[in-house]
Amino acid sequence: MAQDRRSLEKRRRCEASAAALVDCLDMLVEILLRLPAKQIFRTKAVSKEWYSIISDPIFVVNYAKRNSKSLLGFILNGRRAPSPEFFFVSLRGNTSRPARDPEFINIPQIKIQNICKGLLCYSQPHMDDSGFTSYYVCNPTSGQTKRISVLDHSDNRRVMSVDLAFDPLKSAFYNLIFVTELSRSESQQLIKIGTYSSKSQSWSYGLHNLAYEVGFGHGVHCNGAIYWRHVRNNSVSYFDLKANCIQNLGIPQMTSEPYRTNIGYLGESGGRLHLVRTCRPSSIRFTIFEMKDDRSGWLVKCQGDFGNLVACFPRMGRFAHGPFQFNLMNLFEGEREEDLNILLKIPGGVVQYNAKDKTSRKLRGLPRGCVYSEFSFFHWTSKSYQCIETLACI
């Protein structure tokens, strides 16, 4: 009886504290902005006032700005069936005990289409028709999932790319970009691009005649556009959401380099589009470029080579005149503004390399079912996604 009375008194004190915080709205918002995203989602049940604050799009944007450096890790592909295709690489774990994979990786028959700033788009075969595919957008932090209705059944069978456009620093809403091929000839390709808006919960469509080949798939969102890299053609194209047009993008070259160069990586970090050119497979040199805001050109962010890294991890080296053994998977900024880190998959593990001070650390070994192969360099379906937490509602 006494214990029940103490529990009741404790609950009343908690309710009184919560009520006091509601009365001091500025203090409450400041406290919530400092909490991890998962804890914030749990506090939605405290009261209607708390729910209203946390669901406010302005609060979602302010939270993203306050926690813009909260990169948790990466999702990489490379596993072989029957294991899940993707695995998680944490920036905060240790190599002896890798962090557990996120729950969504083990969803049966899942195909990850895109991950953008904390939101996930994936597909699964439809429950009632194996020839039809269902598409979902999910916030793994909150567990919220929404099935996106694709109106045209025939389009669902000729999908070229499914990409997310989401920037929590600017808006709490996202767009889903759905690219389908309608027809193809020797000289032209007719495609339809559908754009789903989570704000209006509606679709808009546009038709595009292309006289050049675009490397659809694994799109990168940056400042209102989706960028696609064509590995075999060494080219980049983009779709401007506002202008509703597709254009080729001029790409930079490495100067004074005797070897043939390739686009080793294209991705977004810190609100900037970065492109890394390498001399694989014959050299370990690289150049990191950053695109100008108006897309008029590129700035050289960093030049260097992986010589220090090869010295630390000799299995990266060449054997019998074969290729150097590494794959560029991601590029990201560090805690310090001047830091620029490269994520690489090498034989036996995943490593982080600071391109500025040339330091490195091994993040984890390769999981069961993931085997590094020198031929993976030539495989243009390598994927990697940055993992962050977001308060966005689906």
Image (cartoon, helix red, strand yellow):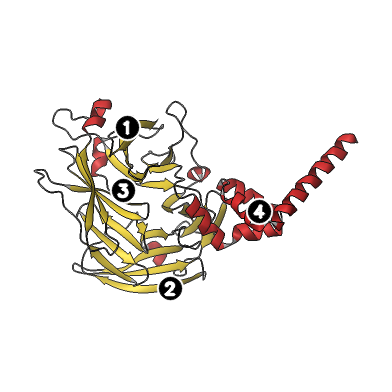
Which tag is nearer the camera, tag 1 or tag 2? Answer: 1
Q: Does 345 sit above or below residue 149?
A: above
Residue 136 visible here: yes
Tag 4: amino acid: Lys
Q: Which mark is first along the chain, 2 or 4?
A: 4
- Upstream in sequence: badge 3 or badge 4: 4
Q: Residue at x 73, y 53 (%)?
A: 20
Residue under pointer 4: 44
Q: Secondary structure at mark 4?
A: helix
Q: Residues within 10 Å of mark 4 (few under 14, many from 20)?
A: some
Are dots 1 and 2 in contact, CB under 8 Å? no
The front one of 31 and 324 is 31
Q: Which mark is residue 252?
A: none
Relative image position of residue 393 (x, y in whole percent): 55, 59
Of circles 4 and 2, the one toward us is: 4
Closer to us: mark 3 or mark 1?
A: 1
- Across and down, in percent, residue 295 comes to 26, 63
| Helix, strand or loop under label 2 | strand
Q: Which residue is mark 2?
A: 204
What label sits on residue 381 in the rendered view? 3
Nearest to N terminus: mark 4 or mark 1: 4
Does 245 sit left or right of 39 as displayed? Answer: left
Q: Quadrant of the C terminus?
A: bottom right
N-terminal of the two: label 1 or label 2? 2
User: Upstream in the sequence, badge 3 or badge 2?
Assistant: 2
- Give the quadrant of the N terminus: top right
Give coordinates of residue 181: x percent, y percent: 32, 66
User: Which residue does the numbered mark 1 point to in the structure image?
Assistant: 360
